[in-house]
């Protein structure tokens, strides 16, 4: 475990579960507490490179680019290894801490080994977002089907209104902040 002051909150869930919405709610809560915070993703560098290659912002055409992201991330982990995948995240988290961030929100936790790494190395608080819409997904990629195996997480249901979801997220992490 690293001896760091920075706090890390990991958000797991299938696509369209509400991970990005949860991250935004947490960042807004941190801002209200005047906690310097930012968002870091395991796959952010790869998504950035792909978006640049297609001359898009990372959020444009998200659904169309998802298979490209999946193949690129799988290929990276096959060639470089999972340990390098995790080390790259650690390096970005260290850089965020060096910039003065006191909180990092990770909104793309997809695999149990990622959640375990966040807990073991960063003493992270993990939440798992579930929704009926995301459970209807027919995507068979492992990144969509392994989040249910992420244990030791606060499970937040996203089946009501946006306001109800944001309130549930804030309640789940407020004590950790």
Image (cartoon, grey):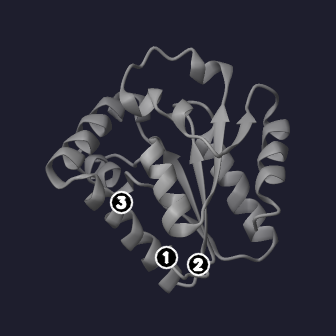
Q: Residue at x 26, y 61 (%)?
A: 84
**In the displayed structure, does residue 174 sit left or right of residue 140?**
right
Count neighbours of disc 2 (C-alpha within 10 A) and say few if under 14, some if 14 to 19, many if 20 or more. Answer: some
Q: Position of residue 56 (x, y in %)?
A: 34, 46
Contact? badges 1 and 2 (CB < 8 Å): yes
Q: Residue at x 63, y 40 (%)?
A: 128
Q: Position of residue 80 (x, y in %)?
A: 18, 55
Q: Which mark is residue 96?
A: 1
Contact? badges 2 and 3 (CB < 8 Å): no
Q: Position of residue 9 (x, y in %)?
A: 62, 59
Kindly report the distance in space between the C-alpha atoms of the residues bearing marks 2 and 3: 19 Å
Kindly report the distance in space between the C-alpha atoms of the residues bearing marks 3 and 1: 15 Å
**In the displayed structure, does residue 117 sit left or right of residue 31?**
left
Residue under pointer 3: 86
Towards the viewer: 37 or 82: 82
Q: Position of residue 141 (x, y in %)?
A: 36, 25
Residue under pointer 2: 101
């Amino acid at each position: 475990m690293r001896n760091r002051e920075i706090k890390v909150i990991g958000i797991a869930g299938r696509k369209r579960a509400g991970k990005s919405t949860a991250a935004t709610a947490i960042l807004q809560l941190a801002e209200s507490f005047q906690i310097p915070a930012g968002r870091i993703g395991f796959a952010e560098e790869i998504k950035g490179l792909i978006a640049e290659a297609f001359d898009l912002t990372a959020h444009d055409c998200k659904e169309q680019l998802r298979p490209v992201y999946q193949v690129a991330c799988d290929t990276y982990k096959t060639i470089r290894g999972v340990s390098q995948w995790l080390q790259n995240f650690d390096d970005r988290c260290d850089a965020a801490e060096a910039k003065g961030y006191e909180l990092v929100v990770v909104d793309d936790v997809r695999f149990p080994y990622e959640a375990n790494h966040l807990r073991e190395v960063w003493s992270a608080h993990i939440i798992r977002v579930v929704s009926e819409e995301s459970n209807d997904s027919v995507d068979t990629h492992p990144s969509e089907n392994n989040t249910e195996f992420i244990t030791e997480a606060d499970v937040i249901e996203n089946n009501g209104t946006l306001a109800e979801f944001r309130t549930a997220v804030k309640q789940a992490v407020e004590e950790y902040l």
